[in-house]
Amino acid sequence: MISFIYFTCQHEKLSKQSKEEKAMAKVQIKVNDNGSLRVTGDVELLDGEGKPFVTKQTFSLCRCGLSNNKPFCDGSHKGRFQSVVRAPLPETDKQ
């Protein structure tokens, strides 16, 4: 009986770790047309000295260089920055 309880506890612990690891691993960075990089997920953003910025679960990073709130986007790019980036097709789809 004790080993069954131990197994159950260990199994539950492993299941919880797996769910937490999956949640942490799911990070998305979207390159917005003519705009920012939209970051969603459990991300720690550090400055050049390794100090963390305070962020939320979703935030936008400047990629135009015009923001007064770098590294974050403040919307300064609107009408003054153009860049549309598309991911290349995988090798198997190119034909």
Image: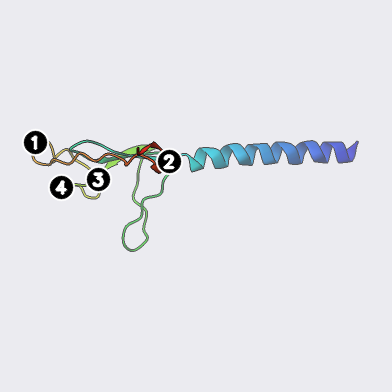
Q: Amino acid at mark 2?
A: Val
**Residue 53 at x, y percent in the picture:** 34, 50
User: With respect to residue 53, does 10 lie above or below?
Assistant: above
Sequence-first disc among 3 and 1: 3
60 or 34: nearer the eye? 34
Residues at marks 1 and 2, CA–CA distance in whole angstroms: 29 Å
- Left or right of 23, for residue 73: left
Residue, disc 3? 72
Q: Amino acid at mark 4?
A: Asn
Sequence-first disc among 2 and 4: 2
Residues at marks 4 and 1, CA–CA distance in whole angstroms: 16 Å
- Classify mark 3: residues with Cα within 10 Å, few (<14), some (14-19) or many (20+): some
Q: Residue furthest front?
A: 95
91 or 73: nearer the eye? 91
Q: Residue furthest right?
A: 1
Query: Judging from the image, what secondary structure is the residue with disc 4 in?
Result: loop
- Classify mark 4: residues with Cα within 10 Å, few (<14), some (14-19) or many (20+): few
Q: Which mark is residue 68?
A: 4
Q: Are marks 1 and 2 in contact (CB under 8 Å)?
A: no
Q: Amino acid at mark 3?
A: Phe
Residue, disc 2? 27
Query: Judging from the image, what secondary structure is the residue with disc 1 in?
Result: loop
Which quadrant holds residue 48?
Answer: bottom left
Residues at marks 2 and 4, CA–CA distance in whole angstroms: 26 Å
Which quadrant holds residue 85?
Answer: top left
Q: Are marks 3 and 2 in contact (CB under 8 Å)?
A: no
Q: Which mark is residue 79?
A: 1
1 or 65: nearer the eye? 65
**Residue 25 at x, y percent in the picture:** 50, 43
Q: Are marks 3 and 1 in contact (CB under 8 Å)?
A: no
